[in-house]
Amino acid sequence: MTDEKGYTLIEMLIVLSLLSVLLLIAIPKLIPPEVLESEQFLTTLKSDLYNSQIRALATQTPVQIIFDNINHKYIIRQDLTVIAENHFPAHLRFEARSLGTHDLRFMSNGNIQRSGSFVFSYERGGGYRVVFPFIRGRFYVEEF
């Protein structure tokens, strides 16, 4: 037999696995912080919308969500009582489409007062559309 210099398959696999682990640790996430903050906000908004619907059903009293673009916040209220007030990121802008700033209301049966949509858009373009189809209490969020 000739004496050949080289590496075994096991040695190569060990080196490749170590390199891949180092790369995963060394390379930071390439997701901009604005996107992470927006996704966290949308999770909170979805939760608040579901909770508002449940509250309207449980108390048999309508719940209204009001968006304030100037102060970057939305207010959830039932009658004149403020239930919650949450801010949305400054880099997002609320845009009323078929649902305006005061049009989002869950009725006592859990359905939305009227179907429609609104948008949270980035200053640089793109954003998220929140859609309430067919006067049901259901909704979905889509990125554009």
Image (tube, grey):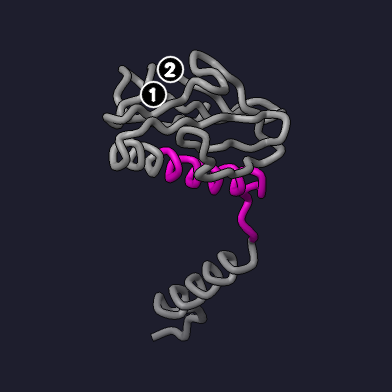
Of 118 and 18, which appears nearest the observer?
Answer: 118
Quick check: 68 above or below 100? below
Mark 1 vs mark 2, CA separation in Å: 5 Å
State the image coordinates of residue 35 (x, y, percent, origin top left).
61, 43
Residue 47 highlighted magenta (yes or no): yes
Pointers 1 and 2 in contact (CB under 8 A)? yes
Judged from the image, the secondary structure of the residue bearing numbered disc 1 is: strand
Check disc 2: other Cα within 10 Å, few if <14, some if 14-19, many if 20+.
Answer: many
Residue 6 placement, left or right of 53: right
Residue 117 placement, left or right of 31: left
Judged from the image, the secondary structure of the residue bearing numbered disc 2 is: strand
State the image coordinates of residue 91 (x, y, percent, origin top left).
70, 37
> What amino acid type is highlighted by mark number 2?
Gly
- Residue at 34% across, 20% down: 133
Q: Which residue is mark 2?
A: 116
Residue 33 highlighted magenta (yes or no): yes
State the image coordinates of residue 72 (x, y, percent, origin top left).
68, 36
Residue 136 placement, left or right of 25: left
Majority SS type along the magenta span: helix
Q: Which residue is mark 1?
A: 132
State the image coordinates of residue 43 (x, y, percent, origin top left).
48, 46
Quick check: 6 above or below 143? below
Q: Which residues are magenta?
A: 28-49
